[in-house]
Image (cartoon, rainbow, N blue to C red):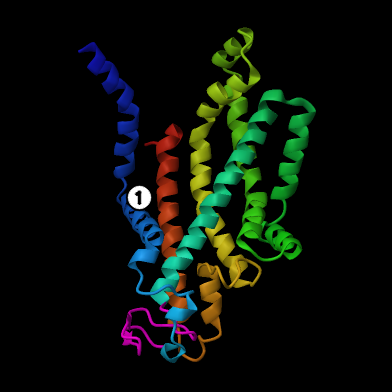
């Protein structure tokens, strides 16, 4: 019985967090939509009627067909086609793969880099802390889009270049967040006890301080994924992001922009809807996680 009660107590925090998360219908709806989007993007090669970037599968005679049209190839294009005869539904799902990969990948790398620097700055203090925080303040004083545009103007186009730009504009948020949390945790007794026991700095940093700094970092990361996706879409729309051979949602929107005045709205409209729905779903989940992980925001 004692073993079961210990196990129940160990699981109760996680169960409480899950129960509090599902109390919000909007957060649950956002999570369901996000799971569906991730699954559709992941299995796009198997569920789409064509690979929109395999020239052998395209027929230019099917170009600019409105939604619901049947093409000469025998396919029904539920969201229409672009000027090259690409099925817009297939193009959107393939574009989601690039947008989500770039957004999540850049956020993960920025989280690791920024958290390590913020943790070290709070723990060691002194000139190192001053240097790191001055760099953070300097970077955050400029708009993220401006920094990314300058970097991509120097580096050129490409998925890897966009990743570098997004990591550069994101890491400072994590450094500042982790430093603030680590300063609070570093003044507590368990950290002082670890220092008195002469534990290695690496163990104190990553076994004691970091786990207690994760809740605010998780919230920031969730919001930053949505911001990274939106920023990448903006850069691609401006023509400095991903190349045409690896299109994201932003590039799909840009490709159809010139056709809006001629009435072929679907080429830009449906990728735009997919982008908005993805960002809103991520933000709904992030907002609920912020409320659940921060006890001061609880009612």
Q: Position of residue 129 (x, y in %)?
A: 74, 31
Q: Answer yes or no: is residue 69 visible.
A: yes
Identify which residue, 284 or 246, lies in the foreground.
246
| Residue occupied by mark 1 | 27
Write the start and end of the magenta stretch as one range.
64-87
**Residue drawn at the location 60% of the way across and 7% of the way down:** 197
In the displayed structure, does residue 116 sit left or right of residue 269?
right
Give the total number of marks visible in the rendering: 1
Question: Most extreme residue toward the left, as rendered?
Answer: 1
Q: Is disc 1 placed on a helix, strand or loop?
A: helix
Q: On the image, which quarter does residue 199 sit in?
A: top right
Identify which residue, 145 or 78, lies in the foreground.
78
Any magenta on residue 72?
Answer: yes
Any magenta on residue 75?
Answer: yes
Q: Position of residue 289 (x, y in %)?
A: 42, 42
Q: Position of residue 31 (x, y in %)?
A: 35, 51
């Amino acid at each position: 019985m004692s073993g079961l009660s210990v196990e129940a107590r160990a699981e109760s925090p996680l169960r409480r967090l899950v129960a509090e998360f599902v109390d919000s219908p909007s957060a649950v709806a956002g999570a369901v939509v996000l799971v569906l989007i991730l699954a559709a993007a992941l299995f796009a090669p198997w569920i789409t009627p064509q690979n929109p970037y395999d020239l052998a599968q395209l027929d230019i005679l099917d170009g600019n067909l409105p939604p619901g049209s049947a093409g000469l190839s025998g396919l029904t294009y539920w969201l229409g086609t672009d000027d090259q005869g690409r099925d817009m539904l297939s193009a959107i799902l393939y574009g989601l793969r690039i947008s989500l990969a770039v957004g999540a990948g850049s956020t993960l790398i920025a989280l690791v880099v920024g958290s390590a620097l913020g943790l070290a700055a709070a723990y060691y203090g002194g000139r190192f802390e001053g240097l790191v925080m001055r760099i953070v303040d300097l970077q955050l004083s400029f708009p993220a889009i401006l920094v990314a545009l300058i970097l991509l103007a120097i580096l050129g186009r490409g998925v890897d270049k966009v990743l570098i730009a997004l990591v550069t504009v994101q890491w400072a948020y994590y450094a500042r967040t982790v430093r603030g949390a680590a300063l609070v945790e570093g003044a507590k007794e368990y950290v002082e006890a670890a220092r008195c026991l002469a534990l290695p700095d690496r163990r104190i940093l990553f076994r004691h301080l970091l786990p207690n700094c994760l809740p605010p970092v998780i919230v920031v990361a969730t919001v930053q994924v949505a911001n990274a996706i939106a920023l990448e879409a903006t850069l691609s729309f401006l023509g400095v992001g991903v190349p045409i051979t690896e299109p994201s949602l932003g590039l799909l929107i840009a490709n159809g922009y010139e056709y809006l005045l001629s009435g072929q709205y679907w080429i830009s409209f449906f990728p735009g809807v997919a982008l908005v729905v993805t960002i809103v779903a991520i933000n709904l989940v992030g907002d609920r996680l912020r409320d659940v992980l921060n006890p001061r925001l609880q009612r």
